[in-house]
Image (spheres, rainbow, N blue to C red):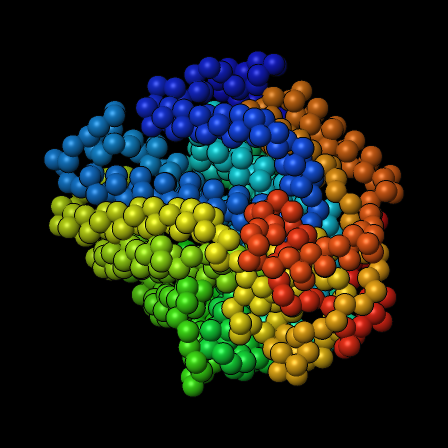
Amino acid sequence: MLVHLQGPWTPLLGRLTLQQIPYQNPILLGTFIFVAILGVIILVATTRYGKWGYVWREWLTTVDHKKIGIMYCLVGLVMLFRGFIDALMIRTQQAIAVGPKSPGFLGAVHGYLTPFHVGQIFTAHGLIMIVFAATPLLVGIMNIIVPLQIGARDMAYPYLNALGLWLTTAGAALVMLSLFIGNFAHGGWYGFVPYFELPYSPGVGVDYWLWAFQLSVLGTTLGSINLIATIVKMRAPGMTWMRMPIFTWASLSANLIALTSFPVLMVALALLGMDRYLGTHFYTAGMGGNLMLYNDLFWVWGHPEVYFLILPAFGMMSEIIPTFSEKTLFGYATMVIASFAIGGVSWGVWLHHFFTMAAAPSVNSFYSVSTMLVGIPTGVKVFNWIFTMYRGRVRYELPMMWALLALFLLLVGGMTGMMNAFASSDYMWHNGVFVVAHFHMMVLLIAASVFGAVEYWFPKVFGFKLEQKWGKWFFWFMVLGTGWVFVPMFILGIAGMTRRLDYIPYTQWAPYLHVMLVGMAFYVVAVGFFVAHLYVSLRDREKNRVGADAWGTTRNLEWMTHSPVPAYNFAFIPHVNARDEWAWRKEHGLAELHAGDYEDIHMPKNTGVPLFLGIFSMGLAFALVWRIWWLALLCLALIVALIIIRSFDRDTDTTIPAQEVDRVERAARDGVTENGPASDLLGDPVVATSSIRSESGGMGGKSSAAQPAWAPMDR
Ligand SMILES: [Cu+2]
């Protein structure tokens, strides 16, 4: 049944031997020492300051959607840094390894990286940036903001929420582990067959790729179920569909795409796993296997996945632009329709990823046209944003600057996307760096939206604004880096440069590659400014404390409760009267409301089960990579046992007593900023400094509190 492998194998350690530890590679050894020292510092500091209990209670076992969202963002940020380092290494290699006379270092003939190493870096960069950086960052922000925007106390399935986080984290950790034990896949992040089949890639790299990918797919699918259920079932009374905030709409459309497309990838990867482990022939060359089956399955996920990432980014822009134009969003209904139109069309375009497979002209024409159709709803959005700004009082604060950068990148990325959509022109530059430059415009648009969203919602989550000076330096150096790296890349793409080169034979291309390296230097400086931005913001946080409505011109429900948000989100569940409910209340003089008699609040209870399910899943994946069968069986047994034990646990809810709600609300109302800190960063999230109360008071009053905003649905 199991495929017989060449090479050593022992029952105890499977394929794992000492030779698999790359201690002879100076780059990896240096990285390992750096990571080890960092890890030791964190462990020692946590012990020294006696924070283990805090970390365990408040973070590792939490089911609070806000904290889970913050941890998603942290995972995304760490992996974004890792993916950036990969990009830096690729650009450095390509700037050195040009022409037959280019020097070689560290065992490489040209440049300082061997072809095998360059392949791994390309593969890791792609997988990490899409699956372990962009996805966690977007999912994290949706996790934090959506329940607040719809007036809920948590997600529909808080336990599932934590499980999604820890499965994604397990996948990310597995990718990182492949740095130090064994190696990673080197054939491209999408893992085309038959190259990723066992005969052509017999090492463990593909298996690392396979299981890390699969864990994140599982986590994202579970998360999408949760967000959809939350939006459909947990909206505050009065919030009809067409009163829903636009970011919530964007999240709903994105997660419908995720729910329908990620299972396809799960199957595609599972079939590849069966080929590699059980010797089946789904995708093999010969024996009845079909290579194109993999391409179809992968990109039937792959293209909708792009919109799973980009629709929330559009949603963020749609929140930021009205706030900083001091107007309501132009064309709300068309914005909603456009999101679903993009989501719908995204299902019928995947074949544009392999126009050159020699299909009939009619097939390529169909997919050319369907791809270009995406431009129509996207254009609707672009015009809506422009008309939102038109005659508005536009304030160029950091969130707005990022949103405008995203808009600009969307135009460049969208136009070059149209160029790729022509099958005829795609024949010319397919598999080239023109395509790479195009989709980097799109992912940088997502990155710009995420940075804008972080600037925008940070005060809501942490209770203080990020400083502006270093943040603007960070912004402008990101702009510089983007221009210097990707304009030459577009030119090289048209000149015929192909993707994933470890060595560039044409010396005429050297100037462009050197300009791109300068662009990377701008990016490095930008990272430095980003760190300064965070450091100064943390240091000066008392100066930058904000009330509930951090920007003064915000429009949606999340700005109605305290900053930072109490554990229960809203003391009373608001009754929604209008679209842009918070703006409506401010206009009607209802922002300042009176406290009522608080009631006990029903909340989900912390649990360590999702964390352990994540750990054992990682153990299972690691055991499968190295084919350590006893460990795989052990982890599987533990996972099953935990699921069974948890299913008998009826004690999954807790109650915040009314006195406690009263205490928190009083502190939030009276604890003004002049007398120093009313709350420490993340220390006591229920105490805040807002002067605006969060009750619905006269509007919905106590009657709305009778309807629980968090009801235990996961039993
Ligand atoms: Cu596509």
Q: Residue at x 51, y 53 (%)?
A: 542
Q: Is residue 47 left or right of residue 653?
A: left
Instruction: Judge whether 407 appears above or below 633 on screen.
Output: below
Q: Position of residue 210 (x, y in %)?
A: 54, 38
Q: Is residue 613 left or right of residue 112?
A: right
Instruction: Judge whether 571 appears above or below 25 on screen.
Output: below
Q: Nearer the viewer, residue 276 or 310?
A: 310
Instruction: Judge whether 85 appears above or below 529 on screen.
Output: above
Q: Nearer the viewer, residue 127 or 168?
A: 168
Q: Position of residue 547 (x, y in %)?
A: 58, 64
Q: Position of residue 596 (x, y in %)?
A: 80, 67
Q: Residue at x 58, y 68 (%)?
A: 549
Tell me, yes or no, if residue 139 can be seen here.
Answer: no
Q: Nearer the viewer, residue 577 or 459?
A: 459
| Quadrant assignment for the N terminus | top right
Q: Residue at x 57, y 54 (%)?
A: 675
Q: Image quadrant of residue 476? A: bottom left
Q: Residue at x 82, y 34 (%)?
A: 645
Q: Is residue 190 left or right of residue 611?
A: left
Q: Image quadrant of residue 4? A: top right
Q: Is residue 362 left or right of residue 68?
A: left
Tell me, yes or no, if residue 167 can be seen here.
Answer: yes
Q: Position of residue 118 (x, y in %)?
A: 33, 36
